[in-house]
């Protein structure tokens, strides 16, 4: 048995002192109250039931106090062992949030589909640290590496366009994602870079960012988002928002080179289903690097001790009621 708060067991001194005090009072009060010529009649009778019962309330109350103190120390059993799969992987999702991500060749549009599928991906990897980087004309960290899935999902839901200068700074986005992992000691480090455009802004060239990632042993999986050819894009007109067909431009050669240089892979997503399949494939590839550890399984025992203390208190109450009825 293991105690979560073993220092509380020092409180057991209290019932020990109460027991010593009770014994002292019992011995002190054993004085004759009646003079008799002989005690022979009483020697044959033995100990009466009443004589035993009068000590029982104190014994039950002391036992209840001991049990309560042990329960407060939170006893736990750890005899069993559980084997848990741990990934040991740090993953940063680098997402393009330029206005071109509003194109509606995905349902309902590119950025919404990318967020929804990324959230599913996050939920499927509960043991990994994950972070979020967004980029358009510049880049910033939406969420640093963390295992807090609720925070990750909430911050992913808040990702949207028009928060930063428009454009497509792939190099800046990748460099920011690499910076989030430079101090990581994970056995495996991965960046999933999602974009739907051509690098046209930023201070860092994508090739330079890829070399930095390679230097730190970070794999980059790149995803080109967008249907082949033309895609419907919402445009504000005097008659409200209308969809207009626009040319899809993705620098696939650049994305392939980034993936190849870092030991990752390039994927092309043309609809929601294909994007979900890509995340599923990445999920399976990274799970191949799983390690197995053993952890003790703790069984809480304080409830049993607390219940036993309650039983002792109830028995004390019953014994006291019985003693009042005895002549």
Image (cartoon, rainbow, N blue to C red):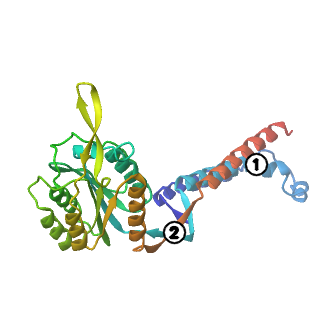
Residue 296: which disc? Answer: 2
- The percent position of residue 200, horizontal first and vertical second, equals 12, 53
Going from the N terminus, do you reach mark 1 or mark 2 first?
1
Residue at figure coordinates x 23%, y 72% from the top left: 262
- The percent position of residue 272, horizontal first and vertical second, equals 40, 52
Of 39 and 301, the residue lying toward us: 301
Of 2 and 40, the residue lying toward us: 2
Task: Give above or below for 218 relative to 130.
Answer: below
Mark 2: few/some/many CA within 10 Å (<14, 14-19, 20+): few
Q: How many marks?
A: 2
**Quarter of image, res 223:** bottom left
Mark 1: few/some/many CA within 10 Å (<14, 14-19, 20+): few
- The percent position of residue 258, horizontal first and vertical second, equals 21, 67
Q: Quadrant of the N terminus?
A: bottom right
- The percent position of residue 57, horizontal first and vertical second, equals 72, 47
Task: Give above or below for 157 relative to 72.
Answer: above
Residue 158: which disc? Answer: none
Residue at figure coordinates x 60%, y 50% from the top left: 65
Task: Give above or below for 256 relative to 122.
Answer: below
State yes or no: discs 1 and 2 in contact (Cβ < 8 Å).
Answer: no
Q: Is residue 182 visible from the viewing direction of this image?
A: no
Per the model, the C-alpha gap separating discs 1 and 2 is: 61 Å
Of 240 and 205, the residue lying toward us: 240
**Quarter of image, res 39:** bottom right
Q: Is residue 101 visible from the viewing direction of this image?
A: yes
> Which residue is label 1 attached to?
32
């Amino acid at each position: 048995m293991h105690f979560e708060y073993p220092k509380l067991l020092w409180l057991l001194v209290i019932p020990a002192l109460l027991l010593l005090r009770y014994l002292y009072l019992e011995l002190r009060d054993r004085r004759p109250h009646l003079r008799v010529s002989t005690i022979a009649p009483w020697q044959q009778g033995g100990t009466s039931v009443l004589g035993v019962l009068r000590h029982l309330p104190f014994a039950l109350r002391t036992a209840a106090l001991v049990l309560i103190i042990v329960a407060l120390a939170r006893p736990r059993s750890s005899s069993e062992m559980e084997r848990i799969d741990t990934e040991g992987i740090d993953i940063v999702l680098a997402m393009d949030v330029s206005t071109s991500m509003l194109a509606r060749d995905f349902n309902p549009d590119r950025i919404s589909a990318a967020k929804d599928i990324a959230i599913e991906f996050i939920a499927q990897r509960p043991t990994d640290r994950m972070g979020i980087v967004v980029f358009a004309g510049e880049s910033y960290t939406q969420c640093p590496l963390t295992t807090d899935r609720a925070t990750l999902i909430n911050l992913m839901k808040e990702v949207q366009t028009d928060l930063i200068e428009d454009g497509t700074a792939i190099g800046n986005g990748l460099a920011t994602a690499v910076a989030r992992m430079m101090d990581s000691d994970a056995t495996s480090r991965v960046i999933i870079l999602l974009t739907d455009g051509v690098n046209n802004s930023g201070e860092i060239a994508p090739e330079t960012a890829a070399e930095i990632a390679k230097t730190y042993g970070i794999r980059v999986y790149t995803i080109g988002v967008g249907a082949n050819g033309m895609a419907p894009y919402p445009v504000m007109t005097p008659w409200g928002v209308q969809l207009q067909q626009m040319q899809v431009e993705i620098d696939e050669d650049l994305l392939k080179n980034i993936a190849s240089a870092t030991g990752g892979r390039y994927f092309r997503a043309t609809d929601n289903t294909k994007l979900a399949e890509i995340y599923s494939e990445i999920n399976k590839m990274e799970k191949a690097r799983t390690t197995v550890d053993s952890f003790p399984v703790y069984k809480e025992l304080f409830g049993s001790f607390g219940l036993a203390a309650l039983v002792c208190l109830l028995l004390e109450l019953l014994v006291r009621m019985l003693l009042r009825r005895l002549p």
